[in-house]
Image (cartoon, grey):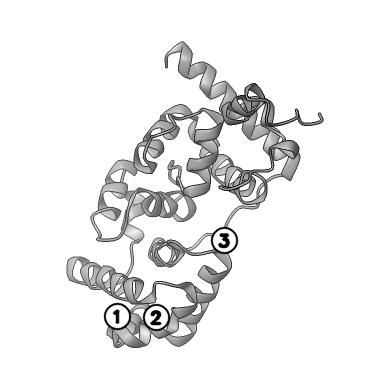
Amino acid sequence: MSSANVNLQSKALCVQARLIKHYGEPVRKVRRDPLSELILTVLSQNTADVNTSRAYDSLRERFPTWQDVLDAPVEEVAEAIHIGGLSQIKAPRIQRILQELADQWGSLNMDFLQALPTDEARKYLTSFRGVGPKTAACVLLFSLNKPALPVDTHVLRVARRLGLIPEKVSAEKANILLEDLLPEEAYYPFHLIVIQHGRTICHARSPRCEICPVAQDCDYYATLIEGGSEEKPTE
C-alpha cells in the first residue's frame, strides 16, 4: 500500500472510531441464508429500510417458500411486495432469479456459495440481472460472512465528502477502492456506522456539519470553512 493510501486508511479508521464513539457500536444484522438475503436486498433497492422489512415480511407471509414465490402469478408477487415500491420491477426480477437458480441447480438455495472464494461468489451473484455490486456485497457480508463492503448511497456520499474516494467516482468503483483501502475486519462496522451517519447527520441536502463528530476529518467541511459559510463545530 502506498504512503498516500496508508494515510487514507488511517483517516478512514479514525473516522470509524469517532463515529462509533458518537453513535455507539453498530448493531449487526440478523443473519439469513444467502437466498433470503439476496431477495431481501433486491427488495431494498431504492427503498427505505422500514418498507423493505414490511415488503419482505409480507412476501414470506403470503408465500411461505421460495417455490411458492416462483410458482405464483407475478401480479400476486407484486401485490405482496407493493409496500416496498417498484413492485412491478422487483416481482419479475425475484422470480427470474429463482427460475435461473432452479434451472441451474435443481433447488432453491444458495448455500453452495459458502464454499466458493469471495471473488467467485461475487461473480456468480452479479450474473443475475438486477444484482449489482452493492446487492452482491450485502449477501457476501451479511449472510456468508465473507469480506465485502456494500456501498450504498450513504456510504458513497459520506466517503466522497470525507475525501476517502474521488468526488466523481461511481458506486462500483468506490466499492473496489474502499475494499482496497480498509482492512477486511473493518468492512462490517464501517458500512453500518457510515450508513447511520449518512442518515442522521450527513444528509444529501443540508448536512448538519455544525454537529458532525468527524467534521475535522472532512474535506467537504473544510471547503465550507475556507468559503466562510460555516462555523467550526464545538468539540
Circle nearer the viewer, 1 or 2: 1
Q: Earlier in the sequence, mark 3 or mark 2?
A: 3
The disc at residue 30 is 3
Q: Residues within 10 Å of mark 3 (few under 14, many from 20)?
A: few
| Residue 144 x, y percent position in the rendering | 43, 52
Q: Residues within 10 Å of mark 1 (few under 14, many from 20)?
A: many
Tell me if label 3 and label 1 are in contact, CB under 8 Å: no
**Which residue is most to the front?**
228
The amino acid sitting under disc 3 is Val
The N terminus, quarter of image: top left
The disc at residue 110 is none
Q: Residues within 10 Å of mark 2 (few under 14, many from 20)?
A: few
Residue 185: tell me if it is visible: no
Tell me if label 3 and label 2 are in contact, CB under 8 Å: no
Residue 224 vertical position relative to residue 211 in the rendered view, above or below: above
Residue 55 vertical position relative to residue 188 in the rendered view, above or below: below
| Residue 209 x, y percent position in the rendering | 69, 37
Residue 122 vertical position relative to residue 30 in the rendered view, above or below: above
Residue denoted by label 2: 65
Q: Quadrant of the rendered structure where residue 11 is?
A: top right
The amino acid sitting under disc 2 is Thr
At a point 46% along the width and 27% down the height, the residue shown is 181
Q: Quadrant of the rendered structure where residue 97 is?
A: bottom left
Tell me if label 1 and label 2 are in contact, CB under 8 Å: no
At a point 26% along the width and 52% down the height, the residue shown is 124
At a point 60% along the width and 53% down the height, the residue shown is 28
Residue 206 vertical position relative to residue 221 in the rendered view, above or below: below
- What's the distance in space between the residues labelled 3 and 2, CA to CA? 19 Å
| Residue 186 x, y percent position in the rendering | 55, 36
- What's the distance in space between the residues labelled 1 and 2, CA to CA? 9 Å
The amino acid sitting under disc 1 is Leu
Residue denoted by label 1: 70
